[in-house]
Amino acid sequence: MLNIALPKGRLGDRVYGMLKQAGYECPSIEQPDRRLIFENPETGVRYFWVKPSDVTIYVERGAADIGIAGKDILLENRPELYELLDLKTGVCRMAVAGPEGFRDTRERTLRVATKFPHIAGGFYAEKARDVELIKLNGSIELAPILGLSDVIVDIVETGKTLAENGLTVLENVCPISARLVANPASYRFRTDEIRRLTERLADQIR
Amino acid sequence: MDLNLKEDEKLLYSLRALYRQYGYRSFRMSKFEKYELYARNKDFLVSDRVITFTDTNGDLLALKPDVTLSIVRNASFRPGWKQKLYYHENVYRPSGSDNRFREIMQCGLECIGDLDSYDVCEVLDLAEQSLRLISDNCILSVSHLGILRSLLNALGAEEEQRRELLRLVAARNEHELAALFESRGWDRKLLADLRALLGLSCSLEELPGKLRALEPQWLDQAVWKELEELSLLSRGRQSLARFDLSVINDIHYYNGIVFQGFIQSVAEKVLSGGRYDSLLERMNRRGRAIGFAIYVGLLEQVLRRAEEFDADVLVLYDRSVPVTEVQDAVKRLRESGRSVSAQRCTEGRYREICDLRGGEKHA
């Protein structure tokens, strides 16, 4: 049985659709109930619904053989996993945003609010820009409005939330999308199964 | 004689016996080393965080986070001679998802000196036999860093690009490798070769033949020669070693063969090793070196079966029972080969209860 960690929410639903199309159907997961584990012995898969940011933990620690994780989580937590495929879904970008007309004059330390301190820290380190990172867990857009930070580094999908809060994208950091990840030990013991699944998913995005 | 050893103690005993059969000697070391040793070779360590403290004479010491550096520091060179050492030591470094300092039991071996292909094969064989002592369901993944080094040289990659490419190979991240080649305008044939190598899984005996099929003009002649020698030495052996390009150790310290061992039901590599001539060079030591470490702590879940009972028999008594009677009961039961715990209450789990308050009963 191949254990697959799926991120709860719209992205997980979309990826399950891809897996179903690839032949890894599991009818019980499509029933509206509150269970978190679903398996189909016929297709040899067991799915878990987990919090998106926890997918890499389940896979890294071997509770799941493979999983679907956002590139943002992979960049931020740098887990020791195989990143087998860019699923080209859940596409968005990591960006620096700030009040419209904001200009970074580099005259003082830049205050950056973010949920992703490693990504933001790495981005500014490459520019040799002195920053103060302020780690927040949500409602990041509030930070520059209330003067908590000068800018934010966050995921931007359409830019609508930013615009509604008087913010705009100042710079792109990196593109983000969903990735198929595998535990390196599981990959070695289940190489053929995991490669087959990867190939079938890859066929859908070519 | 049944020494009543725990499973991990039995394993360490078996590993020591195995290494001694091949002429390896035990190496014991102090818990501390001068911090300077680790500060100079930070990249070689699994983590650059080290527990330090000041000795009474003002020296800055560290609780050792690694064993290999201490062994190499004491290495000496004589032509034709190899220093063969094994160890089992506690090391202190951050570990686990919370990345906090832990005491980690590690055992392994090092072969340092005037090495040749035979020694490389012997160490690979010992790594394989060590894994088999842990579990029948194991995998030994092997690569040769000379392959990637040759490819990086052919690409003319700069330091930062080298790091990025190695990171992507270690993560089997083919889509970002393709993007890296595209953005740098590197030769597409080399990308195709790299992808083919990432998909390659074969024995060391088959490896030169499989590589030849790719016609890698960029592969260094010395690497070819070494792989062909290893193939020859692997001929006819039912080895579980499989080529796996994603096995990468720090390229500044390691060169040549590198390997990692896995056992089913443990989510991380339980064994890691390779050839580290470059470390010797950096530490101004003559000779070549190869070795590996087994992370014994990771095996806890597999080796340690939770003890179902606290003891075979509970001898239950109260203040009305003469102490000599308790003493006699414990002696009699112990002599019958059972473990005994004398208590005045029934707290705990036991196979049987010998109730001195009212006769013998079974649980």
Image (cartoon, coloured by chain):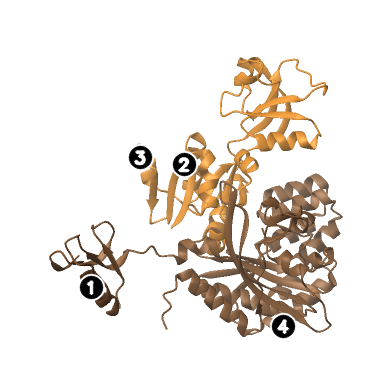
Q: Nearer the viewer, mark 1 or mark 4?
A: 1
Q: Nearer the viewer, mark 2 or mark 3?
A: 2
Residue under label 4 = B232
What label does residue A50 carry, if any?
2
x%, y% of residue A111? 71, 24
B221 lies left or right of B117: right
Determine crowd level at label 3: few under 14, some 14-19, many 20+ residues with C-alpha closer than 10 A: few
Residue at image location 77% in from the left, 36% down from the top = A125
Secondary structure at numbered mark 1: helix
Residue at image location 53% in from the left, 59% down from the top = A186
What is the C-alpha distance between the residues marked 4 and 3? 58 Å
Q: Nearer the viewer, mark 3 or mark 1?
A: 1
B314 lies left or right of B61: left
Q: Residue furthest left?
A: B358
Chain A, colour shown: orange
What label does residue A31 carry, if any?
3
Quadrant where the N terminus of chain A is found in the figure:
bottom left
Q: Quick check: do tags 2 and 3 share a chain?
A: yes
Query: Which quadrant of the structure image shows residue A169?
Result: top right
